[in-house]
Amino acid sequence: MSKSTKPRLEDVAKLAGVSLGSASNALSSPQSVKPATLRKVEEAVRKLGYVRNAAARALASNRSYSIGAVFPSITNPIFADTMQAIQIEASKLGYQLFIASTEYSVASELASVKNLLERGVEGMLFVGTDHEPEIFETLKSGNRPYILMWSLDECDTNYGVGFYNQQAGQMITEHLLGLGHEKFAVISGPIFKNDRMRLRIKGIRDTLAKQGIDLPDDQVIEHPLTLEGGRAGLINALELKTRPTALITLSDILAMGVNAEAKEQNVLIPKEISIASIDNNTYSSVAIPAITTLETPANDIGRKSAQHIIALIEGKKPPRLEEVSLQLLIRDSSGPAPKD
Amino acid sequence: MSKSTKPRLEDVAKLAGVSLGSASNALSSPQSVKPATLRKVEEAVRKLGYVRNAAARALASNRSYSIGAVFPSITNPIFADTMQAIQIEASKLGYQLFIASTEYSVASELASVKNLLERGVEGMLFVGTDHEPEIFETLKSGNRPYILMWSLDECDTNYGVGFYNQQAGQMITEHLLGLGHEKFAVISGPIFKNDRMRLRIKGIRDTLAKQGIDLPDDQVIEHPLTLEGGRAGLINALELKTRPTALITLSDILAMGVNAEAKEQNVLIPKEISIASIDNNTYSSVAIPAITTLETPANDIGRKSAQHIIALIEGKKPPRLEEVSLQLLIRDSSGPAPKD
DNA sequence: GCGCAAAAATGAAGCGCTTCAAATTTAACA
DNA sequence: TGTTAAATTTGAAGCGCTTCATTTTTGCGC
């Protein structure tokens, strides 16, 4: 009894003794067939080991029940949390998530989008606002909704779920200002085409300016978003003309690198230099010293984004901008400015 | 000039002045059409903003050029690395990766597999060997190849890419034995349906047994794979009848939790108790103390798995078992057994 | 039991592509 | 230039499903 070829819905229908149309209805809208029919179809499905063919379904119905999300990186834990939240929520609502990652390469993003579009995703999620205009044009002309996650600052007329990165910069700066710091430096991830970094820096700079503190460009140190980036950043910071007493890292992984390098260089945190960060990834609470950071609710962003994009797909009207709340977690890496 | 409806390949063909078949060939096997034809088609594609319909392609060709991977968790950095490596490699070879995550729930795995199968994946990747037999049966009857990642120990006749977890257990134990330790405890993640945990424990137990050291069940402490799990594990370990001087955590995240709790309880690592782990995730090198761990090459596993599954899909014969190499990274969390 | 509206089932059309046998064009060589 | 084989192109069939206009069955009130 060899299953030479995969059973089709027609085989199911035949075995169940119903028409193809009824078999289809039984699977797609069970409430529209008689219980007896449903039962017969379900049994035939089981007997045959029938598996629906999503490609045929998508082709015939012009629906794929899938959404796409493009991330800068899969391995950054903060995005992993968001991905997970999106997946769980989408799955609850009957949608499948397709993930693309550009590994912070701008060039490949358009290619990823096209690929997802070919795949028939009905809506898309992006991180941040800095993307090739062609991407948005493609989406719009294809009539596909999309949502920008994380950054509300420059969402323009797009849908967004996230927070204001400038405000994030402001909050973390005010914390350090409140501790009496006056000499600042910032370690950022790559800034090109990254609105989160750009706007956080702007928030920091503006907040400092209000106190009459200048943050010249050379005090904003740019490195890759890795532990090594953080280490290199601290080394650079220590070589600055005026050595900072407060160091803001724009992502926790940089802060962890700073921690590690500080230990090697025998720099005391927070005695000599305070570190404050933005993200709150899983590991920053157990870093030594534990990192003071602004929690950006990656989970909430993912969950809400999934809800909103699916609402848009289904013709509903979610709020255009959804703001999630930031929370300052004061831990051990920040302290009063040293008095010299 | 409204694009009322999405352009089809037929529209492209018409605009390019070639037949539907030629247009298809131009896109799928460019070398099989004349350069002039190719050029005309490409231009028409550009003019129309044509996007291929993967569903139609898949339906007509019975190929989806996609693979599926089922992970226990998206957020564990060790799996994130593997996912990333698979994606990069698959993409290079012209395949798309679909990721499913069961969040360590056995029940949902079969559902995930069915979903991926509906979606037309041509091959699948799993973590470990402990899966519902029904999953493998479904795959086999559907004639879909699959590969088991991470665990070679009990691959039976399946294809596998990974290492021997028993050997991993042995290696980490021998390191501690070499430091003179005699009192051991293990903190494991959930063991049910998790061959990695089970086999690592067996490796540890057997190695200890050879030295005449017994590892009774109550010295194997089971907690979720979280920082909190690690913390709770240390607390349990300290309450054991014979307090261990050597603690093996079966995943780095547990070791980080132990680190954190040890600090709070004023337990000195490695002076009073040595910690050795298995994984080497991104963050364990900067933990304080830095965690001695057995590096399991998550990237290699991902890359090789992608290569092998695609080889299988394309009818080639990759090696049935591919072993990746383990490396002991001795850092600060392990040291000589205290002499009392 | 009858008639009628509502519910359920039917079956054929068609979604947009690939494929392949057949037809046509090109290239090679005498 | 003529012939033939090789290289291209063509166009129709069909992948497995959903959909929807029709037909058939069911349920209800009298």
Image: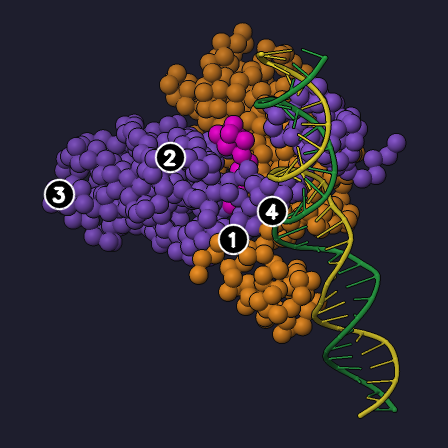
Chain colours: A orange, B purple, C yellow, D green
Tell me which residue sits at (78%, 34%) in the image: B11
Numbered badge on residue B210: 3
Say which quarter of the image contains residue A69: top right
Tell me which residue sits at (42%, 55%) in the image: B137
Nearer to us in this view, B223 or A14 = A14
**Amino acid bearing label 3:** Lys
Which residue is under mark 2?
Answer: B318
- The residue marked by circle 3 belongs to what chain? B
Q: CB atoms at circles 2 and 3 under 8 Å apart? A: no
**Amino acid bearing label 2:** Pro
Please indicate whether residue A116 sits to the left or right of residue A283 in the image: right
- The residue marked by circle 4 belongs to what chain? A
SS category of the residue bearing label 3: helix
- Asked whether residue A272 is in view, the answer is no
**Amino acid bearing label 4:** Gln
Nearer to us in this view, A224 or A201 = A224
Which residue is under mark 4?
Answer: A96
Which residue is under mark 1?
Answer: A5
**Which mark lies nearer to you, 1 or 2?**
1
SS category of the residue bearing label 2: loop
Do marks 1 and 2 both belong to one polypeptide chain? no
Magenta range is B88-100
Tell me which residue sits at (38%, 36%) in the image: B317
Vertical arrangement, residue B263 with respect to residue A133, above or below: below
Whole-number angstrom distance, CA of label 1 to CA of label 3:
53 Å
Q: How many marks?
A: 4
> Label 1 crowding class (10 Å Cα cut-off): few <14, some 14-19, many 20+?
few
Whole-number angstrom distance, CA of label 2 to CA of label 3:
36 Å
Q: Quadrant of the C terminus of chain B?
A: top left
Whole-number angstrom distance, CA of label 2 to CA of label 4:
31 Å
